[in-house]
Amino acid sequence: MPHLLELQACLGHVDAEESKAAIDSIAKIFTQSPCSLDKLTICGKPQATDAAKLLEITPNISILHLSIEDRNYRDPILARLVCQRVDRQCLLSNLRILNFDTIYPSDLWAIIDVVRSRLPKSTKNEISVISGSHCKRLTTISLWYKCSGWDEDLHLIGILKGWQDLGLLRLNSNWLNKPQR
């Protein structure tokens, strides 16, 4: 079976018909010639339906990256799709969300909670959250982290612009310096 290392789909910069055509072309790759895939990256300004189609047609993946450019793009459907995808398969070992201020905080926590609950504890897993400038929205991370009972195999690593001012996020240095595995 052929093996693909990465599929990167940049959507939303063209009209709906062109986006649909691009996704249909990607679908043919996996339907006509079954193959495995390590990493799926969805970037640009995708419609939820486009993202849903990609999450549906791609095979089991170990890495899922979401990079949504439009900060006004707040679609809770996308968060639910990610949760459903994690529910469907348990091979996901790395979830990275860039510019997560485009996703509602409650949806972000839902994604993290589902990933945390579904992944086998025997594997080393990582969730990375990379944000833009709106880091004030993250003040609850420290509280959420401290009361969530994260085990050593799965931890939340935040890489944010503006973390030099730790008073803003109320995060302690031990948490920031937790080594990545």
Image: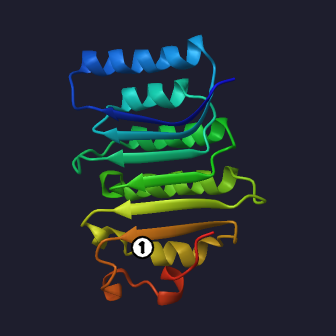
Left or right, 17 with respect to 126, comes to left
Q: Residue at x 69, y 61 (%)?
A: 124
Q: Position of residue 30 (x, y in %)?
A: 56, 19
Q: For residue 100, what is the image quadrant?
A: bottom left
Helix, strand or loop status at disc 1: loop
**Quick check: 98 above or below 92?**
below
Way the structure is coloured = rainbow
Left or right, 86 with respect to 171, comes to right
Q: In the rendered picture of this protein, how many numbered marks are placed on residues?
A: 1
Q: Residue at x 58, y 56 (%)?
A: 113
Quickly name the residue at label 1. 140
**Quick check: 21 above or below 86?**
above
**Residue reaching furthest right?**
122
Q: Residue at x 69, y 52 (%)?
A: 119
Q: Residue at x 51, y 45 (%)?
A: 64
Q: Tell which of 30 and 72 is nearer to you.
A: 30
Q: For residue 130, what is the image quadrant?
A: bottom left
Location of the N terminus by quadrant is top right
Q: Position of residue 160 (x, y in %)?
A: 35, 70
Name the amino acid, label 1.
Thr
**Residue reaching furthest top?**
32
Sort mark 1 into few (<14), some (14-19) or many (20+) by Cα contacts within 10 Å: few
Left or right, 41 with respect to 164, comes to right
Q: Tell which of 31 and 17 is nearer to you.
A: 31
**Quick check: 25 above or below 156?**
above
Q: Position of residue 111 (x, y in %)?
A: 52, 51
Location of the C terminus by quadrant is bottom right
Q: Position of residue 55 (x, y in %)?
A: 51, 31
